[in-house]
Amino acid sequence: MLSITRWIPTVAPLRLPLRLAGGCLLGLGLGLALCAVQPVRAAHPDGVAPARLIRFAAEDWPPFIGPDLPAGGLSGALLQAVYERLGYQLQIEYFPWKRTMEFGLHNPRYAGFLAVWRTAEREQLCHFSSSIGSTQTVLAYAKSAPVAAAGLAGLKGVRIGTVAGYANGEQFDALRQRGELEVDEGVNDETNLRKLLKRRVGAIVIEKHVLQHLLASRRFSRSEAADIASIDSMFKERSVHICFKRNELGLAQQKAFNEAAREFDLGKIEKAYWKDNAKRVMAP
């Protein structure tokens, strides 16, 4: 069972449709223990011994992860499958991105945080899991105020919205650090999209599925959605991961997760999830 919370740790359980056999692989000597892994003390109704609990911090980042998404999002569905296989109850608590990183790295309540892109800097802070989703970053702009650039270097002079704390690929981040790109940081993707529609920025950097999810939601009108276009050739496809703490316990948790995750075909899970997601988006 996946438990989800926002801001405060009051648990609202959600039963996912992706149910798998609950065999445990902890005989590998990679048992999860201490800190973020705790016994769930409530007795199971059928008298079975209670499962242990593992917690993660996350940003609400639909359609990959979120408390209001079917199966908890693509990445949430994969985590649920893996931790059911390991015999654990999964709990995800949601915060803004910077707080997600802080809690996931330093708060003993959490085993880590997600969903995160790998960078050289983050390799020093995390033991990264295997992939929990594939992403494609795009440059979004308003059709009524188009951006003409063949590559990232051609964006000089364009005010670009990004989310504070996000890694946007080696080339983009290097250009930014050298002062060759003008960046305006926002708290999340929705805020940046509103800035774009109000012409406070000339373009925004955003993940493709996240952009599609936002534009299909009721938070944006059809006319607003129709005015947004994107370029996906400026960024490489990247996978997202769980960041486990970079210590002995985090390494054991990473190894246990990765071992169990090998039993699942992420490509098939992604394909099925995006197919179902498209049907939901197209539904009246």
Image (cartoon, rainbow, N blue to C red):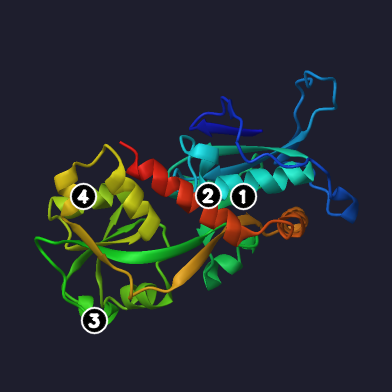
- Asked whether residue 154 appears in the rendered view, the answer is yes
Which quarter of the figure has residue 54? top right
The residue under label 3 is which amino acid type?
A: Ala
Q: Earlier in the sequence, mark 1 or mark 3?
A: 1
Gap between marks 3 and 2 measured at Cα: 32 Å
Q: Tag 3's secondary structure? A: loop
Q: What numbered label is drawn on residue 225?
A: 4
Nearest the eye: 7 or 189:
189
Q: Nearer the viewer, mark 1 or mark 3?
A: 1
Say whether marks 1 and 3 touch (CB < 8 Å): no
User: In this figure, which residue is indicated by the disc labeled 2?
Assistant: 74
The residue under label 1 is which amino acid type?
A: Leu
Say whether marks 2 and 1 touch (CB < 8 Å): yes
Gap between marks 3 and 4 measured at Cα: 24 Å
Q: Earlier in the sequence, mark 3 or mark 2?
A: 2
Q: What numbered label is drawn on residue 78?
A: 1
User: In this figure, which residue is indicated by the disc labeled 3?
Assistant: 150
Q: Nearer the viewer, mark 3 or mark 4?
A: 4
Q: Tag 1's secondary structure? A: helix
Gap between marks 1 and 3 measured at Cα: 36 Å
